Amino acid sequence: LDYDRKKKIMKMDVKNSFLGFHPVFLVEILNYISYTWGHIFREPSHSEYSWRWEVHHGQTSKEMSWQEKSRNPREPGRLTFENVPFAVDNDTVKRLDNISYGQSIVYHCKPGDENAKIMWATAFLQVSLLVSPKQTGLLDELRALEQIGIINKSKYGGAVLTKD
């Protein structure tokens, strides 16, 4: 997300943000998990988390060391996905849904239209926070599934199961 004060435009590279997944796809996954399992899924303990990390990420991840991921970045026992639908409302999804996948988005700010600019940036940042390792870890899990060959990205920024 980049804002050029001189030209009064805001740019976002959708293809390279969120590891190539479209933000609306990520919101849909977050909401599905929240409605289906959000009231029962609790974050694992630090030891359970480190075992899961080694199984899912340890064999394929080259950029992270064991020490970086040996503890759960979220609070063990917390209901991570429980209140996700309250964090992202329909207006936020509509703002993000206007983004075309695979190209940079340029949002032209009209003089004095600071509210629209702030709302657009807030929508992007809300999703960034929700999929981060500190909040839900969804992006890490999608990356692991992609690295071990279970999913691929679709041409629209979603995820599809591999054919094998």
Image: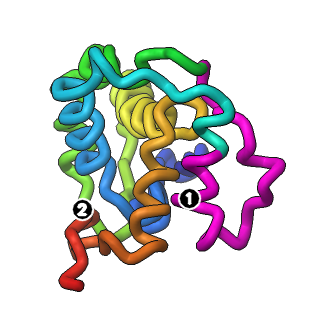
What percent of the width, then of the height, locates residue 96? 27, 43
Numbered circle sitting on residue 55: 1
Name the image quarter holding the C terminus: bottom left
Against 158, residue 62 (above or below) is below
Q: Quadrant of residue 110?
A: top left
45 on left or right of 147: right
Most extreme residue toward the right is 67
Against 120, residue 161 (above or below) is below
What percent of the width, then of the height, locates residue 149? 38, 77
143 on left or right of 101: right
Residue at 29% x, 36% y is 30
Which three-letter amino acid code belongs to the residue tagged 1?
Val
Real-space CA distance between mark 2 and mark 1, rounded to the nearest whole angstrom: 24 Å
* Nearer-the-camera pick, 122 or 8: 122
* Nearer-the-camera pick, 129 or 47: 47
Q: Does the magenta stretch include residue 27?
A: no
Q: Does the magenta stretch include residue 70?
A: yes
* Nearer-the-camera pick, 54 or 111: 54
41 on left or right of 62: left
**First of labels 2, 1 by sequence position:** 1
